[in-house]
Amino acid sequence: RNFATSARRMAVTAAAEPTQHLISVAQAQGIAKGLVGAIGNTPLIRLNRLSEQTGCEVLGKAEFMNPGGSVKDRAALYVVKDAEEHGLLRPGGTVVEGTAGNTGIGLAHVCRSKGYKLVIYMPDTQSQGKIDLLRLLGAEVYPVPAVAFENPQNYNHQAKRHAERLDNAVWTNQFDNTANRRAHIETTGPEIWYQTGGKVDAFTCATGTGGTLAGITRYLKEKSNGRVKSFLADPPGSVLHSYISSGGKLIDRTGSSITEGIGQGRITDNLGPDVELLDGSLNIADEKSIEMVYRCLDEEGLYLGASSALNVVAAKEVAEKLGKGHTVVTILCDGAYRYADRLFSRKWLETKNLLSAIPEHLQKYIVL
Ligand code: PMP
């Protein structure tokens, strides 16, 4: 695949105007208008030890501080707002989505706050805890057999058909609905730019739907005339790293990962042409991600999920590559709360062959 500069230019100039941050800043200083007004405007945290070790400023956007506990609150709000603006969702309507994780929780909060019903389809391999949480947040949950995307019974297709059967209902389609990416073009990107005063040299981020990576990359490239470098951070088992690092020639599906919510098997519409904007890609092994979960806890006091830790590993590697004096920003997607029974369990770590990845002095945190 040809990484044409014209496509690059086209995608950069297509970025939306950053108006949203002005509203967000005002809200942060006053009273949020309902729960949705409290989404976004998260702190940018300097990772002190990592910054000292690399001689760079390594900064993490604290998305775990959103009301629903993850970066997905932003996309949830934007897909619902987009449906309202397009007349697809009127008062009393129903939102339907296929999700096993953070998007469902974000949507549950947003829908409760705005008075919509929420229907969630998810693979039946997901934990009872996730189903219980979504139900107690008011969602109607359908666990369905875990079959591949190609199969019409896949949870995403079932969600689509469910919405089609109802009046005043919308399938929010987080993977290919670009209102997801727009959330990050209009809020997360501008927040990072203004929080750093534009002093940012590189950005690293993992991808599930691609909304976070593509939206922030697009905004930062546009604001800096392409100066800010952006790198995908990919877990094993995702096809994106091989695709990007080979210039679109290679698709390698081998491997699997303990990280949740990230890794992708295709170029979603949210990633789309923005793949061309990326300056490269890093493949991060689970051993490094799990070690970073423990290091962030011990050295920075941060209780992070594995996708956040993977992002931090990528930020560290990019900082080391760029050399002293640079500023690298990454995303702290969610906290470890929902994963604690795995990430801090000796038995689970042994099953995954990851116990030896935790340095001796950090093993005191393995308490479950
Ligand atoms: N980390 C976690 C924990 C997630 O749940 C997700 C979303 N599935 C991501 C990262 C990736 O975000 P995005 O969908 O914007 O690529």
Image (tube, helix red, strand yellow):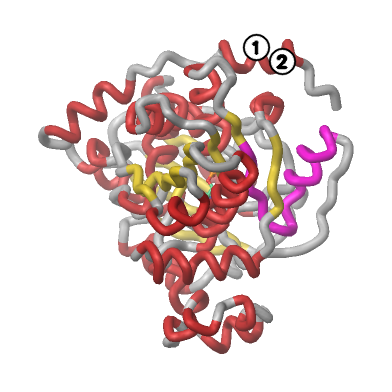
**What amino acid type is highlighted by mark number 1?**
Met
Residue at position x 55%, y 22% from top?
221
Q: Farthest residue in the left direction?
A: 30
Out of 202 and 264, give the one closest to the viewer.
Answer: 202
- Which quadrant would residue 145 be assigned to in this image? bottom right
Mark identifier at residue 10: 1
Assess disc 2: are there few (<14), some (14-19) or many (≥20) residues with their C-alpha within 10 Å of its C-alpha.
some
Whether residue 282 is situated above or below residue 353 in the rendered picture: above
Q: Is residue 67 left or right of residue 230?
A: left
Residue at position x 57%, y 60% from top?
260
Is residue 194 visible in this depiction of the protein?
yes
Is residue 158 visible in this depiction of the protein?
no
Q: Is residue 300 rendered magenta in the image?
A: no
Q: Secondary structure at mark 1?
A: helix
Mark 2 to mark 1: distance in Å? 5 Å
Whether residue 66 is situated above or below residue 350 in the rendered picture: above
**What amino acid type is highlighted by mark number 2?**
Ala
Assess disc 1: are there few (<14), some (14-19) or many (≥20) residues with their C-alpha within 10 Å of its C-alpha.
few
Out of 278 and 37, give the one closest to the viewer.
Answer: 278
Q: Is residue 237 rendered magenta in the image?
A: yes
Residue that mark 2 sits on: 7
Q: Farthest residue in the right direction?
A: 249
Residue at position x 54%, y 37% from top?
203
Residue at position x 80%, y 45% from top?
242
CB under 8 Å between discs 2 and 1: yes
Bounds of the magenta segment: 231-248
